[in-house]
């Protein structure tokens, strides 16, 4: 199939999606909006009633919110990995999934930081972070890092959109309303596909792909240091930076596989997203799971083997109160993907997707048992405190806001896939850009 | 001892006089007069006052402009603190029997609700064979405070006289300082305070009126120190457990006796809690030796709710 044919067949494939909207789409959209709205209601409750409506108290000062914060920020690694690393290595198979990866990155980077805002008692003073910043504080590092990451990833995403915007502007096959063509025209920035324009875009994308890898590593390390720099048992660990980075790649590639599965079924993309993609992504997941498991083991082994009282208390708590979560997060969540992808007989699309779902949920639980048990095990035992304040249980407000985050993630994905083909047409039809040189 | 006490009170008197004198100079011009409440007002219409050059004189009452009891100390002033001082606290664990008067006085003085303790009492047992004891924990006002390092907006700060304060008008409520503090000394205003707040201008030295969604903690009653009074927990303690004083003067007092800090720490083997964390606390502890009461007597006469708070920890042994 030559490039023009491929382009036409792809346009045909996405014609129904871009032209019409089914009732089912509207129904799920409405349901998601309700879930999101419910979350907003919870947020209003929290803002008007104070943080007392959450399960957070003087010991567990951050709860499910910060878990969601690290979790969503981690998902954004899908982009850094698939579109960044694979773009740099110029792997051919990445092409159909690159757009999904970039969308995951930008969408989760938009959602993630909201969760840290929910931890903040005085949202009316948020601008103090910018007008009275103190660079000593890891939170200031985070502000700088996340803003840079968001900007960088958005730019990278947009660079990969330009050619498709131009394509949608120029094509005649899909009938689009006038206003949408106008938007495409405006967003395409006058791109016509001259060799010079191609060169610029491709060079910019190569530079950005290297940069977002670096930025992503920095941002996630900084995020880990919010915990790592404190003196708290379980957090005060040198491994936290790389451990968080690897965990993020783990969840990012897991989510990538899940979305590949969903879109493949939804838009019938079997001929583009093949078993090969699942196996390749699965192998990536396996390698990352191995590293992640190794880091987890290193972190807990040293705490468990030593005799430091406060570490023993933490480990005792993990093995008692949190034993089910610990087992699920750190055994099943890591070993299952390795076994499923590692043994050829189990290596099917369905199995790999199932393993990814479990891996992503297990990673969320892993974040939970990093945050909560430590906060419940301060140096001075929790005494002289109301009984109800000792242990943390998330309230409906926190769960609603978590559900709202998942809902808005899907909503944004739905909207994005309506606006643009979920497979990058220009990426699929482009010849190897390495032959193009910007300076001749 | 009595000499030292006298010396201390004389110094306190001089300082009060000096403050009054300086305010007078600023307000009414050089050589003018100003009475301070502590000097007392005569019934005959004459009052005693201190001139800027230190002479004690008598003047007519109607010539006097009375200085307000305490002027509001804003953020800037609260950051400077009291010059030439370095405050220190010593807690004598041998005397504490969980009377909880410190907690009550603190909560009353700072308009805190009952579940909001700036000073907490722990039932501590260091190792299985050693005797448990009561362990009061105010804010340690560390010399190397983690809470100050991690604050992203400069809402919490360490001043030269040793006190660590929180400015509730700057605090964004991110709670990072709460996870940063290894002593769990900080508390959060989770909701609008159920205690009615006084109608005063906010001061970081009192953290009153409290602001919902911000962090609070023990301030060593910086407002009282400015007036040469002891922190509320010190004066409220019936046992004289808590000594407070100045490292520069090398003197601490529990309101009953005034002693040399260095001698006290040396003779009674003073130590700081969790020295190994390197936070360098400003609070010293004296070991719980030769106690004349049982540790269980700390539960006598307490509300059921208070006893409940220690349940898991007492039964464990």
Image (tube, rainbow, N blue to C red):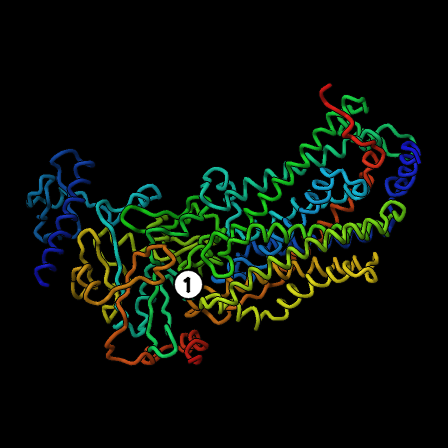
The answer to which image quadrant residue A143 occupies is top right
Q: Quadrant of the N terminus of chain B?
A: bottom left
Please say if B74 is above or below B8.
above
The chain holding disc 1 is B
> The residue tagged with tag 1: helix, strand or loop?
loop
Left or right, A368 with reference to A404: left
Residue A315 appears in the rendering: yes
Q: Position of residue A43 (x, y in %)?
A: 61, 54
Task: Tell me if mark 1 has few (under 14), some (14-19) or many (20+) residues whose alpha carbon lies within 10 angstroms of its own.
Answer: many
Quadrant of the rendered image containing residue A247: bottom right
Give residue B301's position: percent from left, percent from top: 34, 80
Q: Which residue is mark 1?
A: B116
Image side of residue B313 versus residue A269, left or right: left
Where does the C terminus of chain B fall, quadrant-wise? bottom left
Side of A45 relative to A333 (left or right): left
* Count of picture labels: 1
Rendered position, B198 above or below A179:
below
């Amino acid at each position: 199939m030559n490039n023009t044919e491929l382009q036409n067949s792809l346009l045909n494939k996405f014609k129904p999606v871009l032209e019409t909207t089914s009732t089912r789409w509207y129904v799920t959209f409405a349901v998601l909006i309700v879930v999101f709205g419910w979350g907003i209601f919870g947020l209003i409750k929290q803002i008007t009633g104070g943080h007392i409506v959450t399960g957070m108290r003087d010991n567990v000062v951050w709860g499910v919110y910060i878990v969601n914060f690290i979790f969503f920020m981690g998902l954004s690694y899908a982009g850094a990995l698939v579109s960044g690393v694979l773009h740099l290595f110029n792997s051919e198979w990445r092409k159909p999934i690159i757009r999904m990866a970039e969308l995951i990155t930008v969408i989760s980077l938009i959602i993630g930081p909201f969760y840290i805002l929910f931890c903040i008692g005085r949202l009316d003073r948020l601008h103090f972070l910018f007008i009275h910043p103190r660079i000593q504080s890891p939170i200031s590092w985070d502000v700088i890092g996340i803003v840079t990451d968001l900007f960088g990833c958005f730019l990278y995403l947009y660079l990969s959109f330009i050619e498709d915007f131009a394509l949608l502007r120029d094509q005649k096959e899909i009938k689009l309303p006038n206003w949408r063509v106008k938007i495409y025209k405006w967003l395409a920035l006058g791109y016509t596909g001259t060799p010079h324009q191609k060169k610029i875009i491709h060079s910019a994308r190569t530079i950005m792909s290297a940069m977002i890898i670096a930025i992503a590593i920095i941002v996630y390390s900084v995020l880990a240091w919010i915990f790592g720099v404190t003196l708290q048992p379980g957090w005060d660990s040198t491994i936290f930076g790389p451990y968080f980075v690897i965990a993020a790649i783990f969840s990012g590639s897991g989510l990538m596989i899940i979305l590949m599965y969903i879109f493949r079924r939804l838009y019938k993309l079997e001929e583009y997203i093949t078993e090969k993609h699942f196996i390749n992504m699965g192998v990536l997941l396996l390698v990352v799971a191995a590293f992640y498991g190794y880091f987890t083991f290193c972190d807990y082994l040293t705490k468990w083997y030593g005799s430091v009282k406060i570490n023993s208390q933490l480990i005792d708590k993990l093995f008692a109160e949190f034993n089910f979560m610990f087992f699920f997060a750190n055994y099943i969540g890591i070993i299952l993907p390795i076994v499923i992808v590692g043994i050829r007989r189990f290596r099917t699309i369905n199995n790999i997707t199932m393993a990814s779902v479990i891996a992503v949920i297990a990673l969320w639980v892993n974040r939970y048992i990093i945050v909560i048990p430590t906060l419940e095990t301060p140096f001075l035992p929790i005494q002289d405190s109301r009984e109800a304040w000792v242990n943390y249980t998330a309230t409906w407000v926190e769960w609603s806001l978590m559900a709202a985050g998942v809902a808005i993630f899907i909503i944004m994905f739905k909207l994005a896939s309506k606006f643009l083909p979920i497979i990058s047409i220009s990426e699929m039809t482009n010849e190897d850009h390495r032959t193009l040189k910007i300076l001749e | 001892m009595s000499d030292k006490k006298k010396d201390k009170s004389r110094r306190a008197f001089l300082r009060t006089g000096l403050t009054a004198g300086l305010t007078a100079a600023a307000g009414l011009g050089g050589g003018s007069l100003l009475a301070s409440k502590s000097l007392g007002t005569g019934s005959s219409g004459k009052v005693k006052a201190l001139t800027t050059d230190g002479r004690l004189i008598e003047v007519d009452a109607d010539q006097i402009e009375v200085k307000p009891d305490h002027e509001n100390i804003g953020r800037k002033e609260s950051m400077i603190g009291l010059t030439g001082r370095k405050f220190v606290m010593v807690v004598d664990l041998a005397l504490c029997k969980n009377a909880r008067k410190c907690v009550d006085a603190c909560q009353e003085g700072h308009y805190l609700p009952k579940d909001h303790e700036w000073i907490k009492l722990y039932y501590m047992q260091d190792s299985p064979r050693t005797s448990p004891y009561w362990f009061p924990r105010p804010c340690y006002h560390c010399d190397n405070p983690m809470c100050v390092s991690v604050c992203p907006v400069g809402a919490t700060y360490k001043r030269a006289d040793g006190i660590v304060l929180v400015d509730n008008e700057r605090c964004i409520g991110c709670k990072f300082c709460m996870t940063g503090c290894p002593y769990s000394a900080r508390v959060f205003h989770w909701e609008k305070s159920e205690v009615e707040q006084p109608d005063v201008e906010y001061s970081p030295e009192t953290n009153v009126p409290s602001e919902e969604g911000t962090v609070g903690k023990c301030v060593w009653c910086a407002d009282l120190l400015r007036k040469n009074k002891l922190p509320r927990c010190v004066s409220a303690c019936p046992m004289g457990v808590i000594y407070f004083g100045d490292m520069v003067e090398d003197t601490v007092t529990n309101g009953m006796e005034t002693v040399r800090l260095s001698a006290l720490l040396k003779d009674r083997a003073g130590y700081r809690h969790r020295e190994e964390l390197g936070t360098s606390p400003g609070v010293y502890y004296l070991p719980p030796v030769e106690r004349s009461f049982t540790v269980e007597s700390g539960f006598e006469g307490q509300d059921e709710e208070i006893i409940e708070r220690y349940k898991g920890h007492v039964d464990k042994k």
